[in-house]
Amino acid sequence: MGKSPDSDNDKANAALDALDAVLFPLAKVLLDVGLTSKELEGRVRQVYVTAAARQLAKNGGKVVLSNVALRCGLDRAEVRRILESESASNDEARLEAHRLNRVINGWRQDPDFCEPNGNARALDYSGETGFGALVNRYAPSLYAASVCAELVRVGVVLREQDGRVSLRADKYSSQGMDRQSLSELRGRSQDVMVTLAQRAIAGGDQPLVAEAIALNVDAASIHRLRRTMRDRAESFVRLIDEELCAPAVQASPGAGKRVGIIVIEVGEVLDD
């Protein structure tokens, strides 16, 4: 008896499970750099609309607002707004919008909380011009204690010995990550997800996916194994690079396709 085809509901649930697997590790990064769930939701809507519009155009259809809205589950006004807006967000505008940065900016600019020369004052925790009042003015939906603890954690705020709090940085940002590492995350994630998405929807000649993973490696052996994997991966990638750069496989400028291979060491703390 042949295997019954998956229902649309089965496929949707499997896709949502895959989305959970992708978003969970990414959410840790987004939380660390100060992105809120509301900002993520806005970006998801933007990506959905853009993808639907491009898909309709690629299939030879006219990009009609009602068609895009129907596929994305949004109203036409929202689709129009997204399509007419700039695709790239402005980093400074996003930082201004973040509630913790609104608190910091108020501390630096509001005369009730800063010196006449523009320097942020060291604040008592309570009182009409204290830290609690600052948070209530610029982020009223947040608890002052939680805001203080988070800003202290990332080094933006210092607790003084006399109980006051002082500002040590001009914006909220994460520790341990910089623009370069986040840019690499974007590029590597895009390559991997585009490849796996093509594999999921393609028939016939599918992208290569190969793996060699052990589930119970002794921690004492990890350093040696990493060195071995890196040495062998570098040798392998050099050979592939020679093949990709050979004149016989090169197309004229602008006429070829992007093809290659990426070797990524998988590392995971199983109880995380």
Image (cartoon, rainbow, N blue to C red):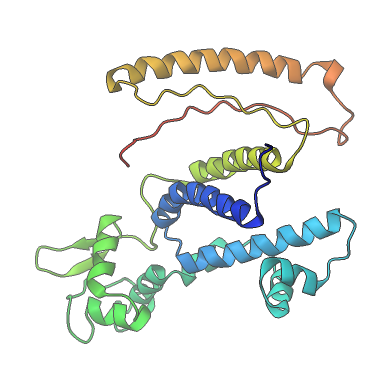
In the rendered image, the vertical position of residue 267 relative to residue 150, given as above or below: above
Q: Residue furthest left?
A: 162
Q: Is residue 113 visible?
A: no
Rendering coords of residue 217 (x, y %) = 34, 22
| Quadrant in which the N terminus is drawn | top right
Rendering coords of residue 87 (x, y %) = 68, 62
Rendering coords of residue 266 (x, y %) = 46, 30
Rendering coords of residue 265 (x, y %) = 48, 27
Left or right: residue 16 versus residue 63 is left
In the rendered image, the vertical position of residue 256 relative to residue 130, given as above or below: above
Q: Is residue 120 visible?
A: yes
Q: Residue at x 51, y 47 (%)?
A: 22
Q: Name the residue nearer the viewer: 87 or 191.
A: 191
Q: Residue at x 78, y 74 (%)?
A: 66
Q: Residue at x 59, y 62 (%)?
A: 44
In the rendered image, the vertical position of residue 129 relative to residue 107, given as above or below: below
Q: Name the residue nearer the viewer: 73 or 256.
A: 73
| Quadrant in which the C terminus is drawn | top left
Q: Residue furthest bottom?
A: 128
Q: Name the residue nearer the viewer: 272 or 230.
A: 272
Q: Name the residue nearer the viewer: 188 or 96.
A: 188
Write down the quadrant of residue 198 in the picture. top right
What is the total number of numbered labels drawn onto the structure image? 0
